[in-house]
Image: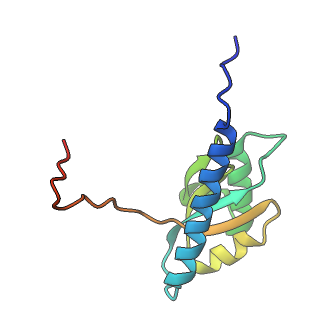
């Protein structure tokens, strides 16, 4: 049994991904990284066709980091639904190396966004 198609849903998801990428790129350019400390990055990759996404992500990370053990330690999460990629804790040098790997489309620093509560004018959150 197929799930009914929602018109525009695919377009909506693609728009969200593009906007998130744009925001990440803009913030990454404005923050600058001078530290050699490992930080969480989102690595966008081509969608693997002949293996499981997590296996592909670990193989890609292993190529850049030098071992499967280092890749397993660095890998935080494998994305496989709305986008293809993974998050990993990487130093600036490792970011440079992973960026050179086949199938890697983009590497951006992970950002945390905080929502602000409206103040005044009768706003009340329940």
Rendered-image quadrant of the N terminus? top right
**Residue 47 at what x, y percent from top left?**
77, 47
Query: Residue 59's quadrant in the figure?
Result: bottom right
- Left or right: residue 76 versus residue 61 is left
Can residue 70 be seen here? no
Q: Residue drawn at (64%, 52%), measured in percent from left and top?
A: 15
When the figure is inspected, residue 88 is found, relative to residue 53, above or below; the finding is below
Can residue 95 be seen here? yes
Q: Residue drawn at (78%, 53%), measured in percent from left and top?
A: 46
- Left or right: residue 25 versus residue 39 is right
Residue occupying the far top of the picture: 1
Rendered-image quadrant of the C terminus? top left
What number of labels is visible?
A: 0
- Left or right: residue 62 versus residue 32 is right
Q: Residue drawn at (54%, 58%), measured in percent from left and top?
A: 73
Residue occupying the far front of the picture: 121
**Residue 71 at what x, y percent from top left?**
62, 59
**Residue 58 at what x, y percent from top left?**
68, 53
């Amino acid at each position: 049994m197929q799930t009914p198609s929602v018109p525009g849903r695919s377009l909506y998801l693609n728009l969200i991904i593009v906007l998130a990428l744009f925001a990440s790129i803009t913030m990454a350019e404005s923050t600058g990284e001078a530290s050699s400390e490992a930080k969480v990055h989102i690595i966008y990759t081509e969608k693997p066709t002949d293996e499981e996404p997590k296996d592909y992500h670990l193989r890609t990370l292993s190529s850049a980091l030098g071992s499967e053990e280092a890749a397993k330690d660095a890998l935080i999460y494998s994305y496989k639904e709305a986008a293809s990629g993974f998050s990993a804790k990487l130093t600036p040098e490792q970011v440079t190396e992973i960026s050179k790997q086949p199938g890697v489309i983009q590497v951006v620093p992970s950002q945390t966004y905080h929502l602000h509560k409206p103040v005044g004018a009768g706003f009340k959150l329940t």
